[in-house]
Image (tube, grey):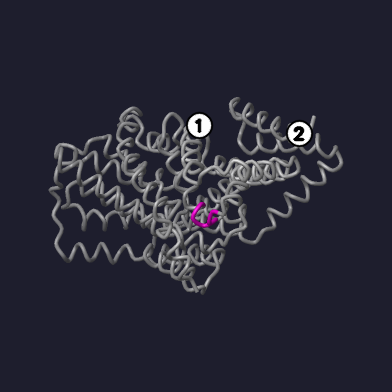
Amino acid sequence: MSAVQIGFACIALLLVLLALRVPIGVSLGVSAFTGLLSLRGLDAAFALMGSTTFQFIAHWSLTAIPMFILMGAIAFHTGLTRTLFDAGKAWLGFLPGGLAIATNVSSAGFAAASGSSVAMAGAMSRLAVPEMLRARYNPGLATGVVAASGTLGAFIPPSIPFVLYAVFMEASVGQLLMAGIIPGLLTMLAYAVLIVTRVKLNPDLAPRTTQAYSNRDRWLLLLKSWPLPVIVAGVVGGLYTGTVTATEAGAFGAFVAIAAALIQGSFSWTAMQQAVSETVTSTASIFLIAIGAVLFSRMLTLSQIPMNIGVWVEDYAVALWMFLLAVTVFYIVLGMFLDPIGLMLVTLPVLAPFVIAFDIDVIWFGVLVVKFIEIGLLTPPIGLNLFVVSAGVGDKVPFGQVVRGTVWFLAAEAVVLILLMAFPQLSLLLPSLMY
């Protein structure tokens, strides 16, 4: 069996293991070890497994991940996120679908203290959905906006998917984090326009809120939400000016979250213990998948599949738009069944040769990839955000209604995706102005 045939056999093995519901990290590791064993023998396979794993884990940029997770966990467990939602409700509640828009905007703010779409969806499902249901909002709209707004966590810095993509594709972590800001805000705006339009056409979806706020109350609530804006300023401002690196920004954000909780009197050792435990568990899970992906990528390189793909692209001169269309379908279909981080790390070794062959800007492609995997969080039957929101609301809203409410936001995602493809500068403007 040739090296290329071994590589494709290992890809087939990976798909079989995933179909059998074997954890993604384990599936990647087993497929990679099988290929390395066939290509290089037992001793070389073990040596490559050890050296590759160490080289990847020792990558300094990866230390940003536990820092970002810790920052978001502290903000959630100490109640810092609730103050932002309360302020959003006071300032935006008068609009058509005001509570839903407040949830959308608050999610964008929480994104700057989280970096995880799933964490955001879980937090806002417990925080915002009960408020909207009490205000007699349509259950589908209430849960759909939470599931969709959760995806903002992957775009507005900090962003765990961008850090992993940068390390894997040897791109600038700082530039990728900055590249997500405009697409994230554009997505938030698209959601808000969708909400207002739907409620204007069907006012029964979201009755106008009867709760009145004085100007004094509005400003007091806004001032009370100061921790998250400070975290945003520290993370985004530090990255933009080059004052801090991605790793330092995460550590600074975690420090500010602890300091804010202490100042507001919401800090407790129980909350800190929960935050640290959540950080350790999430980091270990992400790193297991990432290690498996790196090993699988090394196996594919040795099998010469990437080189053959590059030759094939050059020989047949496939158009760029055809490649992007194929990648879109590829990610949306696979996103229905796979965890987003796992999906990204499984597919990058296969797509990297195409990126090189088409001379695609690696930053722009990173934004598209993250947008693809975030859309996957909203697509049934395995859209992870759908299940997270459903679990958060319990029996109050049937799962079918959660799905139907989210489908509307997929239309907004399609518009944003087309804009990002048609105008790469939406992703590249801020990175080009850095430092």
Mark yes or no: residue 126 visible.
no
Name the spot of residue 202 as percent of width and height, x first.
15, 37
Mark yes or no: residue 52 visible.
yes
**Left or right of 418: which side holds 272?**
right
**Number of marks in the image?**
2
Could you tell me which residue is drawn at 67 percent across and 42 percent down?
Answer: 292
Could you tell me which residue is drawn at 69 percent across and 45 percent down?
Answer: 307
* Residue 19 placement: quadrant: top right
Question: Which of the two residues, 361 or 408, is positioned nearer the viewer here?
Answer: 361
- Residue type (three-letter) at the residue carrying disc 2: Thr
**Residue bounds of the magenta highlight:** 360-365
Q: Is residue 364 magenta?
A: yes
Q: Quadrant of the N terminus?
A: top right
Task: Give the secondary structure at mark 2.
Answer: helix
Q: Is residue 168 magenta?
A: no
Q: Could you give the CA–CA distance between mark 1 and mark 2, rounded to whole angstroms? A: 24 Å
Please name the residue that numbered disc 1 is placed on: 337
Question: Which of the two residues, 49 or 211, is positioned nearer the viewer here?
Answer: 49
Please name the residue that numbered disc 2 is placed on: 34
Magenta: main secondary structure equals helix
Question: Which of the two residues, 12 or 71, is positioned nearer the viewer here?
Answer: 12
